[in-house]
Image: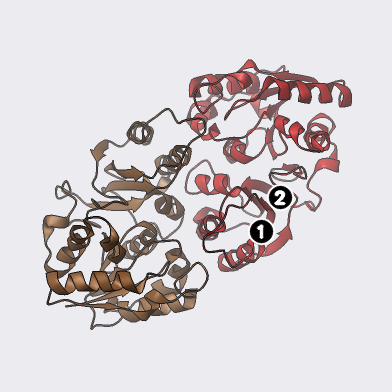
Chain colours: A red, B brown
Amino acid sequence: MRIGVVAPGRPIDPVVAARAGAFAAIAYPDVDLVFHPQCFESAGHFAGSDAVRAAAFLQVANDPGYDAVWFARGGYGSNRLLAAVMPQLGPAAARKVYAGYSDMGFLLGALYARRIGRPCHAPMATDINRQGGDATVARTLGWIVGGDRQGLEPDLAGRPAAAFNLSILTALIGTPWLPDLTDHVLMIEEVSEPLYRVDRMLFTVANATQLKGIAGIRLGTVNDVQENDPPWAETPEAMIAHWAGDMGVPYLGRARVGHTQDNHVVPFGIA
Amino acid sequence: MRIGVVAPGRPIDPVVAARAGAFAAIAYPDVDLVFHPQCFESAGHFAGSDAVRAAAFLQVANDPGYDAVWFARGGYGSNRLLAAVMPQLGPAAARKVYAGYSDMGFLLGALYARRIGRPCHAPMATDINRQGGDATVARTLGWIVGGDRQGLEPDLAGRPAAAFNLSILTALIGTPWLPDLTDHVLMIEEVSEPLYRVDRMLFTVANATQLKGIAGIRLGTVNDVQENDPPWAETPEAMIAHWAGDMGVPYLGRARVGHTQDNHVVPFGIA
């Protein structure tokens, strides 16, 4: 099995690629993990220009020699590729798994909107750098390589699901790149935001016409919360319960997704 | 003429209210500027609880004794009132001017979506605190009191227009609170954001199904820009021109709206 790694947002350090590659070579010896050289390019904020990142993604996605596209890391930028790449995905792209999270939710969402391939919210190559990161990335590789369910979010319960970073989800709302999530359990996680912004984004989710039919909401990790001045009075869980109530959908409890070592795999749709 | 001042987001200092009141008394002696006591309440982040803020807004909006609602200041929170207040606005509310900007764009947008009253993007009472703030607030008062066009954004040119803070606009996109802006010139301003976020929000604007029919985009002030690491390569003007091109609408140049002393009045629709 060959897995291609690309970086549609920001670049990664070759040392991190080597660590992830070394782990994969030991834990999954049958896997050929190929880091596209684009992962290490740099153009200002991004891992190469929009054209370079789009070309690398399309090259791997459309190559029948690859079984999966694994995103190297997040960081802003994958939304800038959607208009260019989505119309150019061919038959080989439709047979692949696409794995990542955070900013990569733009691509996962757009792929799922068009029912191309099998997008999943999942730890990325750079998560190898976390304490216990071997276990984190093993969840993704286990799912891609052998359909190993140990790394799946533990309460999927056979219901259709999707997981998004809240900032990315709200940036998709109102656009045709947001997939139809009717009857899906929607998991939301967030990192490095003050709580007033989280509240504002939950307002958008709760009022989004496109999300009226979701089955329920679960709350992933909300961490590295930025200071709110004055302090915010509600917890993230109280906030999401409040907005889910406004939306008329059940709040279904916590989910093990987010920007942490504990991040789990959520295949979009039914796993 | 009586103008009621309320604070649907964060509270204001009584000293600021006194300054604005003193200026109004001298410059517009026929105006009775009434600060609702709710402006000075405090409940955590907000100028009173959601219920208190909603009640104050409704009281002034529905009172035939007031000719206009002037928002005291911005700061997160007016979106939390929409579901409660919008269905309760009566005939007196439909005859009023509503003036504010920044977070108040939630209310202005929702009012315009339902064609209630005459919402306008305009300096607020706390803008009296800016250097040269007398001239800033005079633009709003002059428009409310006598239809004085000196404070209007200078290039309205008889075309329907609306102005929003970019963060507020994107939080409205995808919801029924966003007004129909077909054939409107849309002015966008932003404050205190890093440029990668501005770019992400412009992506949402450019891809928003609801905004497909706008006549064009103008760029207000983008100030207090937060550091981007690494530095962002494009200027806000290049960014908005790029995304307007993606959207297929003309970029029509700069607009004198934003979080500065130079902020001007933009009555929604045709002035």
In percent of width and height, residue B223 lies at: 35, 44
The residue type indicated by label 1 comes to: Ala
The residue type indicated by label 2 comes to: Pro
In percent of width and height, residue B191 lies at: 38, 48
Quarter of the image for the N terminus of chain A: give it: top right
* Residue toward you, A107 or A271: A107
Q: Is residue B16 left or right of residue A227?
A: left
Quarter of the image for the C terminus of chain A: give it: top right
- The residue that label 1 is drawn on is A215
In percent of width and height, residue A149 lies at: 84, 41
Give me the residue at 68% from left, 24% from top. Answer: A5
Disc 1 chain ID: A
Q: Is residue B113 left or right of residue A131?
A: left
Give me the residue at 85% from left, 37% from top. Answer: A148
Checking the image for residue A160, the label placed there is: 2
Give me the residue at 81% from left, 50% from top. Answer: A154
Confirm whether residue A190 shows in the render.
Answer: yes
Q: Is residue A236 above or below residue B174?
A: below
Sequence-first tag of 2 and 1: 2
CB under 8 Å between discs 2 and 1: yes
